[in-house]
Amino acid sequence: MPPPRLTGCYTALVTPMGPGGEIDWDGFRRLADFQAASGISGIVAVGTTGESSTLDPAERRAVIRECRERLPGSVRLLAGTGSSSTVESLRATREAGEAGASHALLVDPYYNAPSSLEIRREYYEPIARASPDLGIVPYVIPSRTGTRLEPADLALLAEACPNVVGVKEATGSDAYGREVRRLVRSEFSILSGDDARTSDLMRDPEVRAEGVISVLSNVFPGTLATWVEALRSGDGTSDGVASRVRALTPLLSLVTIETSEETPGGVVRVRARNPVPVKSMMRILGLPAGRCRPPLGRLTPGACTVVVDALRKANADCPELFDEIEAAFGVSVADRLADPPSWQGVAYDD
């Protein structure tokens, strides 16, 4: 029997760091408890949002085990096990299953950028066959990997390996999800890999995405879980949830922030990419997150202003959006947004 399909809202969990760059285990447990209490469908541990590329193998195993021990059985656990090496991903996927994950999320091989045929034959197929009891979920994000598993190869993969149960779709292409849905079996899950496109992919009758693997659900898991369930059921949302979703929607685009910065050499475009913005947002609001491990760094002052202004507007429009944060972490969001010294260090100061 193939592993269960994936539906609902899954949080791509950040890995909180201490001041010396070590994993903040106390903060990690608080974040896991926050997620477990929110009604979220599952967690992705040590994915790209969790900075898997800068965690060593022992740290990745420890994070997966801690998640499984901390989370109730009703919260599904996925583990990020993709890399640019099939041998490395084979090992990581096997160890993820041993540590308690039910599914492995594997990003397409980055930098060496094999063709779609090679991705299927030399990467996903051997990994799926080596771990037949583990659900396998390809993660297709060409903007970060420089390559793309094509829908035709994904369909062949799912047919050959029944434990390939879904795809995290982050191509930015309307056509990709439609082609996947046309080619794969009906029970195959398409999950949005882009917070801002979740509604479009779930409402599109030619895609019928079943949910999202979300970055912003690190901050707003309850609201996102409720919203995604409403999109799945087609029943609509209550007035209270609808107002929270309206206030939340502009924040969904802040997974990546691009600003123009003045330098002695002229204007430079600076792009802060996931997980820098979400960890910065968490620090501003008083959630445990810490900095990213190098080479990822901080926001520019301009990008920090974008985040703070967006949070202040959301709080003014719908303070109830932040209720779950205040209850779980004992903070006053309004006070923190009005107190820049409380989030000192989020941005570069030179």
Image (tube, helix red, strand yellow):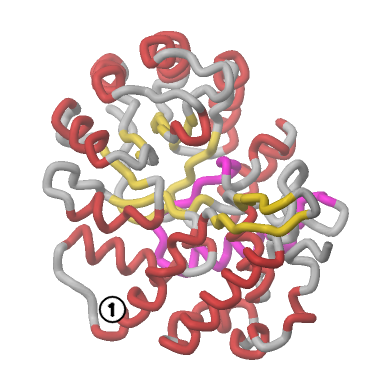
Callout 1, which amino acid?
Ala
Per the image, is 311 magenta? no
In this orientation, does residue 323 appear? no
Per the image, is 23 magenta? yes
Given residues 276 and 269, the one toward you in this image is 269
State the quadrant of the C terminus.
bottom right
Q: Residues within 10 Å of mark 1 (few under 14, many from 20)?
A: some
What residue is drawn where x is 77% and y is 44%? 294
| Left or right: residue 242 compared with residue 76 | left
State the image coordinates of residue 1 (x, y, percent, origin top left). 27, 27
State the image coordinates of residue 84 (x, y, percent, origin top left). 58, 21
The magenta stretch is 21-48
| Left or right: residue 275 compared with residue 300 | left
Q: Which residue is mark 1?
A: 242
Location of residue 37 with respect to 210 vertically, above or below: below
Q: Residue furthest right?
A: 20
Location of residue 122 with respect to 48 vertically, above or below: above
State the image coordinates of residue 119 (x, y, percent, origin top left). 43, 16
Location of residue 6 with respect to 10 vertically, above or below: above
In this orientation, does residue 179 appear? yes
What residue is drawn where x is 41% and y is 69%? 250
Numbered-mark total: 1
Q: Quadrant of residue 244?
A: bottom left
Given residues 74 and 185, the one toward you in this image is 185
Given residues 3 and 178, the one toward you in this image is 178
Is label 1 in a helix, a strand or a loop? helix
State the image coordinates of residue 4 (x, y, percent, origin top left). 31, 38
What residue is drawn where x is 42% and y is 87%? 317
What residue is drawn where x is 15% and y is 35%? 186
Location of residue 232 with respect to 38 vertically, above or below: above
